[in-house]
Image (tube, helix red, strand yellow):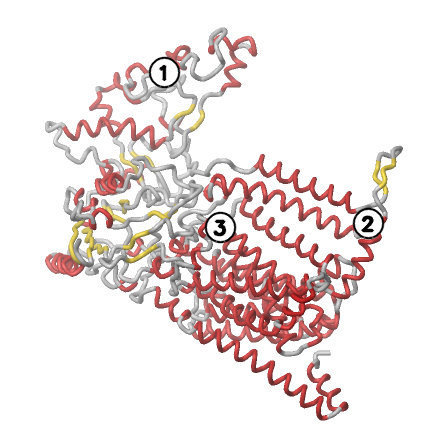
Amino acid sequence: MRNNRMFVFKAILWCVAGLAAAVAVLRFALGLGVATALSDTTPWGLWIGFDVMGGVALAAGGFVIAAAVHVFHRETFHAAARPAILTAFLGYGAVAVGLLFDLGLPWNIWHPMIFWNIHSPLFEVAWCVMLYLTVLALEVAPVILERTPFQKAYRFLSRLALPIMILGIMLSTLHQSSLGSLLLIMPFRIYPLWYTHLLPELFFISAICLGLNMVMFESSITSWLYRREPETKMLGGLAKLASAALAFYFVVRIADLAYQHKLGLIFAGTWEGNLFILEMLLSTVLPMVLYTLPAVRRSPTGLWLISMGSVLGFVLNRVNASGLSQVWATRSFYFPAWTEFAISLGIVSACGLIFFFIQEHFPVDPHGLNDIEEQRELADKSSPAFAPFTQVWLGEGWRKSARVYSMCFVVAMALGLTLAPKTEPAVTRKAERARGANVLRVGDGPRYVYFDHKRHQDEAGKEKSCGTCHHLHLAGDVGTPCSECHRRLFVPTNVFDHDRHVERAGGRESCAKCHGPGEPQALTVMKTCQDCHQKDMMAAGNTVVPAFKNPSAASYKDAMHKMCIPCHVTKAADPKVNLPNLGRCGACHDSGTQSEKAYKTEVPPGQEGIGRT
Amino acid sequence: MIQNPCILTDVTKCIGCEQCVAACKKINGLPAEDAPPRPGNSVDGLSADRWTTIIRRPDNHFVRKQCRHCAEPACVSVCPVGALQKTAEGPVIYDKSVCMGCRYCMMSCPYGIPHYEWNSAAPSVRKCIMCYGNMKSGKISEPACVTACPQKATLFGTRDAMLAEARKRLKAEPGKYVQTIWGEHEVGGTSVLLIADIPLEFLALNQGHPLGDTPLPERTWAALKPVPFEFVGMGLLMGGVYWIIERRKKLALEAGGAAAKDTRGEAGHEK
């Protein structure tokens, strides 16, 4: 019988991988701006916080178990060693792939090899990733080579296993802590609860805790997926170890906060404080306490849940330190775009698929392989058969699953290519109607544009001059405000409703009314708006907009700049007017006394949102 | 080109005309019209196409923001490939051919200066370079923004001369100025100094808290200096532990079968 759990799980992984492949195409063709929600204020997002910071931390199981089994001779954990090292290898592979996505110029990823800057923690990180990936490949190689004809290479690598393991532990020590060093340069960004001079040390200790939990989590989940007996004895031993490691981490972290007099911040009620409490409870306090209970250590479900919670808690720690705790300083809220999630999850899924492939074909876990081989042989023998009457496939062979998997991948990729954004997102802030025709607010904080309507009216020639600026005159309106069409501050607004025109003009037969008979129905050969709407528009007196041709209205900013600046510059050059600064930005954008006071008298505090158009 | 060049901006004299912005865009070949801002970026702040800007504060205060060209720049110290360099003269410059686009410089800058070309498939980091190339080749003798200022609100000279000028002004009108030269000691000192009649802490990302006078790179170097020793130390520790346990096992084996059983029990006492 085929293992359905595994089949469904793999199909989901293939879907996610397909979606990620689609986003990857867009990311490399159109740039980071299209594929991410990153900004200059938040230049590092999900890909660094989760993929790199989290990925490296999740791979910690490899060096922790390698040390326990091969150096400290804890033979009980032997079963976990090979899967853990394989996970570490794939985890680091994921980090490297994730970096390729995140780097702006990914083809220069090899530059740290020749351009050195030993003062940069990221330089250390880069070298550690390169070296440790090589070491992990050497650690994984014997597993792959064991049942192949390359026995000489297998024996050679097996003999070198111990020095390679120790080198791996040495590199991991540096690498885990260097991710903490990475953040030391930004005391101004990171919330005090996470910023400490002990960041590198804390990252190292928490990596050990996380590594142990990760091994437990992984072992539980593979035995569930492959319907195998959980290795309760080994898990119980790991839980004991983890409990001690977590207690040490807890003491160091709290003692460090106490030393810096920051304990008060935890219970200050701020969302950073609550985030800290959540992170510590999930990652450290709960597992530390629960692992000491023998009843919990004997329960595979309990261990699975607790270790998963702890893993999530430590990933949250990395995300907090490198991202969430910085909202405090930047005041800019970043939430990853779905495309960012797709890439992150896609990399994880691809790693999962490779992990299962290696586990099913190579002796990663000697006990498990025999079961799996039996299952596979059984499946291979029963080739798929098509029952013509019922129109269903009977029997299950590799062909069918491959077909389902590739279909999952292709459909997801097509979906991704259709849905993914093609242009860079821009701020779509609404333009605000000029308040009392004296001031206009253009952004958050004290940013006002001063505009004395009466003075402009007087200068331009009283009532008759309205058309100089107002080129639209809606029914029942005396000079329609600019924000009626120029609705958004920085990006153009589409103001022409084609469907409504078709409907009003009489359906499909009416095309020729605007486009002209026998002419291509394109924008270039078309009636202009004022051909019909002359009486709604006072365009005649307006020198800036002599004719309406464009179906979209320029952004408010562009419209105002084009309208105001030429006139102001001319007036500024006029010696009779004697206002030399009139043509300069500060003349309107002064944010100062006159505009701010005018704004505050016209808009009582608390009513800023009312009256927006 | 002079050694240790420095720009001093007197906020009390600025009228917010943005001639400096226009001049900067012209000499660096940047588009005159700013692209619409990305969500999350500040609205009228710096961008990849705007290397200096005027921040408008209440009551007619105009504060010019640009790269501070720190004496010990965080961005230069964190760049893993050295694409950002502090030149021998002083300005901090950028080399795209070396950059790999990690954006660590943007994370590490306490003033949020380096900006990125988000809409490009091959983006670079953009920021003020104090007109380094043009000054070095002798094309201009002072940065374009300084030349453009109609109010002489922003001045150029050696750092010592600018500090002296700033002190002179603070002393001459103690009632007018806040008695601080921003950039004199901040994060180890910067080559762009500001004096003003309002506090200027808002220029840093620290939400108004002072940044401190210690150069930021010192914080990471303290962690990076002992790295070789940690590396070797860990290796020795692991090798040592392995050797001791192996030796104990071997001795136990030699001592006889009964003892060997005990050792095995000890080695795996988690059972």
Q: Amino acid at mark 3?
A: Asp
Q: CA distance from mark 3 to mark 2?
A: 41 Å
Q: Nearer the viewer, mark 3 or mark 2?
A: 2
Q: Residues within 10 Å of mark 2 (few under 14, many from 20)?
A: some
The percent position of residue B171, horizontal first and vertical second, equals: 12, 60
Q: Nearer the viewer, mark 1 or mark 2?
A: 2
The percent position of residue A476, horizontal first and vertical second, equals: 39, 18
Residue at 64%, 40% in the rendered image: A412
Q: In the image as oriented, which residue stretches furthest toward the bottom?
A: B255
The percent position of residue A135, horizontal first and vertical second, equals: 57, 65
> Toward the viewer: A384 or A11?
A384
Q: CA distance from mark 3 to mark 1?
A: 50 Å
Q: Nearer the viewer, mark 3 or mark 1?
A: 3
Residue indicated by mark 3: A102
Q: Are marks 3 and 1 on the same chain?
A: yes
Residue indicated by mark 1: A537
